[in-house]
Image (spheres, grey):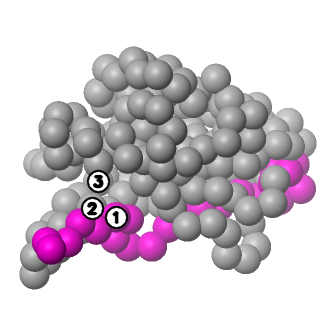
């Protein structure tokens, strides 16, 4: 996918889950983090109500998943998640998901990459990235690259 697209947006509910519930584990045996592609049937925002990926919560983002061709149901696994404390800043990082290769059977309505925790039973969503203009994955590879670290939390 050519050019720079949207910024990764973290759901408010993810921050609550990390700090209040301890759902996401980025320790010695970190949870499996995945990125899946959805269409714009739903408009995502930081305030999307309790987003999950076919688990437990209010908003099931898996209902809008785009599959077929090189798009496997459930999305691509990201490299191991890590959390590092760096001079008073917590840095959470997930590796980029693998590229979805161009294929004639791929979806044509790719709007968001949704990042979720595939390890916990509730499959809570972490955030999303808007892909810019709707992407047709039959015409080229879809590659999502986010910066490192993925997310930071600063002491204030």
Identify the secondary structure beneath mark 3: loop
Name the residue rendered at 74%, 62% in the picture: 132
When asked about the image quadrant of residue 106, the answer is top right
Q: CA distance from mark 1 to mark 2?
A: 5 Å
- In the rendered structure, the answer to whether residue 35 lies left or right of residue 22 reads right
Q: Earlier in the sequence, mark 1 or mark 2?
A: 2
Residue 127 makes an appearance in the image = no
**Viewer-nearest of labels 1 and 3?**
1
Residue 14, image x, y percentages: 34, 44
19 and 139: which is toward the camera: 19
Q: Earlier in the sequence, mark 2 or mark 3?
A: 3
- In the rendered structure, the answer to whether residue 151 lies left or right of residue 145 reads left
Q: Where 115 sits versus 143, above or below?
A: above
Identify the residue position indicated by label 3 in the image: 81
Name the residue rendered at 58%, 27% in the picture: 62
48 and 88: which is toward the camera: 48
Q: Residues within 10 Å of mark 1 (few under 14, many from 20)?
A: some
Q: Is residue 148 magenta?
A: yes
Q: Are marks 2 and 3 in contact (CB under 8 Å)?
A: yes
Query: How would you classify the magenta stretch by its main secondary structure?
Result: loop
* Span colored in magenta: 135-156
Identify the secondary structure beneath mark 2: strand
**Viewer-nearest of labels 2 and 3?**
2
Residue 1, image x, y percentages: 74, 66
Q: Are marks 1 and 3 in contact (CB under 8 Å)?
A: no
Identify the secondary structure beneath mark 1: strand
Identify the residue position indicated by label 1 in the image: 151
Identify the residue position indicated by label 2 in the image: 92
């Amino acid at each position: 996918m050519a050019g720079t697209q949207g910024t990764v947006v973290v759901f408010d509910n993810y921050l609550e889950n990390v700090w209040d519930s301890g759902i996401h584990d980025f320790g010695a045996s970190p949870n499996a983090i995945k990125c899946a592609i959805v269409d714009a049937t739903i408009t995502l925002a930081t305030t999307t109500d309790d987003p999950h990926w076919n688990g437990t919560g209010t908003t099931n983002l898996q209902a809008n998943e785009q599959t077929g061709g090189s798009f496997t149901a459930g999305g691509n696994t990201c490299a191991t998640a890590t959390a590092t404390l760096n001079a008073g800043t917590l840095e959470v990082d997930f590796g980029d998901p693998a590229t979805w290769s161009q294929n004639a059977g791929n979806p044509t309505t790719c709007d968001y990459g949704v990042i979720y925790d595939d390890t916990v039973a509730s499959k809570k969503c972490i955030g999303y990235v808007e892909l810019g203009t709707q992407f047709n994955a039959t015409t080229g590879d879809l590659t999502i690259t986010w910066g490192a670290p993925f997310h930071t939390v600063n002491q204030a």
